[in-house]
Image: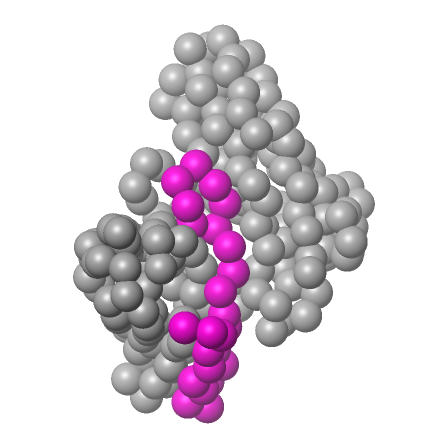
Amino acid sequence: QQPVQSPQAVILREGEDAVINCSSSKALYSVHWYRQKHGEAPVFLMILLKGGEQKGHEKISASFNEKKQQSSLYLTASQLSYSGTYFCGTEGGGSYIPTFGRGTSLIVHP
Amino acid sequence: GAVVSQHPSWVICKSGTSVKIECRSLDFQATTMFWYRQFPKQSLMLMATSNEGSKATYEQGVEKDKFLINHASLTLSTLTVTSAHPEDSSFYICSASPFRYADGYTFGSGTRLTVV
């Protein structure tokens, strides 16, 4: 079953922060986050495994609450290059093939 | 990091013809590859999972005879859209299971198929 992402869209100014959420109705083994630019393939950002992981790289970080079957992606001090559609992919419920959410469109203005 | 090369990037074909899309893992062996279809502003919908040397596993609702998948080697998987129709026009993306799980799934660059 497809994970649910919120919000559907976010519009920011450079330097502002954003949070994108991903929730699932099934027990999760892992959550992946990807960013896709228009007309391009998704690019892997990070993966979080069950065990309550939190990780980050530069100004993008994520957390995974396996009990709530939720993950959040945090974008701090957003840059123009952060614009794109963010997808979470979840593995769980007996399947190790990621199922993707509908995506969150992020637009960063100067 | 792992690279998956997908060709062509775009193709325009006439209705009724067949189109082949290739996906190659360049610096690793991909035992499993996934094929997705993406409509504008929508999510990645898994079409099928292909394992090297065996028949692909198709998702419910995907026509096996229309979308032929071949995974003849550890580095190459192909998707052939047979007897294409305008409703098959879409963005098709492949991805390979990670060499290292922590690296996540690597996607090809995608193929924009337009059937006229």
Looking at the rendered image, the quarter that the N terminus of chain B falls into is bottom right
Vertical position of residue B54 compared to residue B19: above or below: below
Vertical position of residue B18 compared to residue B50: above or below: above
Vertical position of residue B45 compared to residue B39: above or below: below
In the rendered structure, the answer to whether residue A5 lies left or right of residue A54 reads left
Vertical position of residue B99 compared to residue B6: above or below: below
In the rendered structure, the answer to whether residue A45 lies left or right of residue B87 reads right
The answer to whether residue A20 shows anywhere in this view is: no
**Closer-to-camera residue (B48/A104):** A104
Magenta-colored stretch includes residue A56 = yes
- The way the protein has been coloured in the rendering is one colour
Question: Count the marks: how many?
Answer: 0
Residue visible at 61% across and 68% down in the picture: B103
Q: Position of residue A38 (x, y in %)?
A: 39, 40
Residue visible at 20% across and 55% down in the picture: A11
Please identify the residue farthest to the front as the structure is shown. Answer: A110
In the rendered structure, the answer to whether residue A84 lies left or right of residue B50 reads left
Looking at the rendered image, the quarter that the C terminus of chain B falls into is top left
**Closer-to-camera residue (B92/A92):** B92
Q: Position of residue B111 (x, y in %)?
A: 53, 32
Q: Position of residue B54 (x, y in %)?
A: 72, 48
**Closer-to-camera residue (B26/A60):** A60
Magenta-colored stretch includes residue A87 = no
Q: Position of residue A39 (x, y in %)?
A: 43, 37
Residue visible at 46% across and 10% down in the picture: B15
Residue bounds of the magenta highlight = A36-59
Q: Quadrant for residue A13, please give it.
A: bottom left
The answer to whether residue A63 shows anywhere in this view is: yes
Residue visible at 69% across and 57% down in the picture: B2
